[in-house]
Image (cartoon, helix red, strand yellow):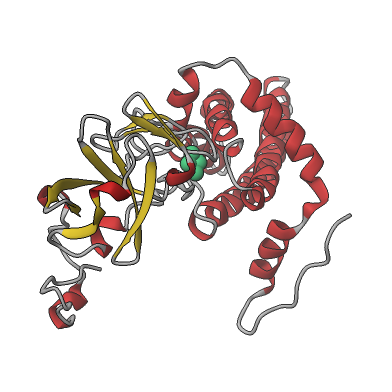
Amino acid sequence: MSKKPGRRLLGQNRMLWLLDALERDPGRDQLIEALTRRVRALPLGRVRDVLHGTWLGHPVHPMAIHLPLGSWMSAAVLDLKPGRSRQADLLVALGLTGAVPAAATGLADWAELHREQQRVGLIHAWANTAAVGLYGASLVMRLSGKGAKGRVLGYLGLTAVGVGGLLGGHLAYRQAAGVNHAEEVPHVVSDGWHRVGGVDEFPAGEAVRCVVDDVPVLVVREAGGEVHALAERCSHLAGPLSEGTVADGCVQCPWHGSVFRLSDGWNVTGPATAPQPSFDTRVVDGHVEIRLPTETVPDTPYAGDAFAATSTDGHRPRR
Ligand code: FES
């Protein structure tokens, strides 16, 4: 049963209120669960990571939408100009072709999101599917000589794409789907070495969670004595890596299965498209210490740093 939208907050416009209500509405959750299972069960192998964008370092989907969106917007402009119908038809067809990789990458990402994100993502997908249907019908009309109807259908398709884009923006910028959830770590952890515990507090091969400057850190000591430290919150959607599985020099996130190399944080498999920030480690007087590698310390610190207080251990906090 659908929940009623919550109370509208002071300053919250009606559209934002509706989008927030959409996140909370469990009315389509059974469908979402069934679709998620099916998408995850597809035997895609390494293609799944290609669709996520592990090779690119961020999701492919935002890039993939440029071809359909650009083609259809261009067709809409040409449709305003008499004598340009052939070019507009071609652009509509090009957009339909480009919609295939856009949909494939979006679907792969959608299946690995939080439920609230999936609720918005489903409507985003429906809007874009409607756009594809309208542009498909538009192309049929255009090719059968009914240009006026084709143009009307095209403009309706563009409207549907606009709705899809609005929901996509909400997903990315308000709900943080697809962004790197570990990006802030080098900006938050202060420079220099931080003592995180005695060596005996880190049983060999086990994932241990520590906190440095309020940032959770995963520390793993290998049987040979080597110590690794990564940001503990997964770059995909902030899953707790300390509750994941450590094996073969890697840690696997318990939420969606991304695998990160312990030695340097590299994302070996997705859906995470960004590596985990990793730390230098050393053992001093029987204690494990970690620090940000000097090359990951941001070159352009937050402007307010000039006024920031120096921390008690003499390190200037970064923002
Ligand atoms: S939170 Fe999704 S893979 Fe880690």
Q: In which quarter of the image is residue 241?
A: top left
Residue at 53% across, 54% down: 169
Residue 261, given in percent of the width and then of the height, sits at 31, 32
Residue at 37% across, 47% down: 208
159 on left or right of 203: right
User: In the depicted view, which residue is nearer to us: 258 or 263?
Assistant: 263
User: In the depicted view, which residue is nearer to us: 256 or 169?
Assistant: 256
Asked if 37 appears above or below 286 in the picture, the reply is above
Q: Quadrant of residue 147?
A: top right
Asked if 172 appears above or below 139 in the picture, the reply is below
Q: In which quarter of the image is residue 89?
A: top right
Q: Can residue 286 be seen in this view?
A: yes
Give the position of the C terminus as an image quadrant. bottom left
Asked if 232 appears above or below 13 in the picture, the reply is above
User: In the depicted view, which residue is nearer to us: 201 or 138?
Assistant: 201
Residue 63, given in percent of the width and then of the height, sits at 42, 37
75 on left or right of 261: right
203 on left or right of 142: left
Q: Is residue 90 visible?
A: no
Asked if 293 appears above or below 150 in the picture, the reply is below
Residue at 60% across, 50% down: 162
Residue at 74% across, 37% down: 33
Give the position of the N terminus as an image quadrant. bottom right
Residue 61, given in percent of the width and then of the height, sits at 48, 36
